[in-house]
Amino acid sequence: MDMNMTMNNMTMDMTMQMNFYWGRNVTILFSKWPGNDQHNPGMYILALFFVFAMAFAMEALSVWPTIKPGGSAVAIGLTQASLYAIRVSLGYFVMLAVMSYNIGIFIAAVAGHTVGLFVAKTSALAMTKPAEFEPSTSI
């Protein structure tokens, strides 16, 4: 989709990718970030790690234990609401990054969600006490 906008004698050409593509020339979340310097892929790689980290953090926050016995109900409620707001914000940022239709960003987001869920769930399972295994003597 190509659009030309004229504002106060300034013309801006706005081009938005409408299909998945592979390349480093991408804008993610903010104007001119990570930039389109084809000779320096460092900012693009940093953007991939950033999207991965946001998706990972979103999944990690989903199982974070916030309720502690004996705490104030208001403090517990504020803590849970704050963590939820952060999680939702991260989710929207990851969604907006994926809407750049860049395959690298998409893979980084899916990998971040996958690894984040794996780490969060395995650590949550490790915190729970497993039931003692008693072998059955009856045949």
Image: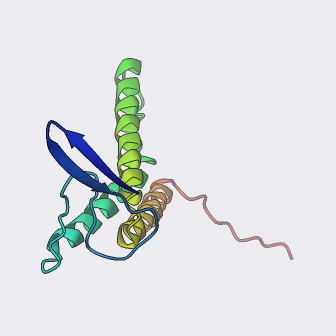
Of the 4 image quadrants, the one containing the C terminus is: bottom right
Is residue 87 visible in the rendered structure shown here? yes
The x and y percentages for residue 85 are 37, 35
The x and y percentages for residue 90 are 35, 47
30 displayed left or right of 107 = left
Q: Furthest-front residue in view?
A: 9
Of the 4 image quadrants, the one containing the N terminus is: bottom left
Res 116 quadrant in image: bottom left
39 up-or-down from 107: above or below:
below
20 displayed left or right of 4 = right
- Front in this rendered view, residue 132 or 77: 77
- Front in this rendered view, residue 19 or 73: 19
Residue appearing at x 15%, y 44% in the figure: 10
Residue appearing at x 28%, y 65% in the figure: 26
Res 15 quadrant in image: bottom left
123 displayed left or right of 47 = right
The x and y percentages for residue 89 are 36, 41
Residue appearing at x 19%, y 69% in the figure: 36
The x and y percentages for residue 33 are 19, 59
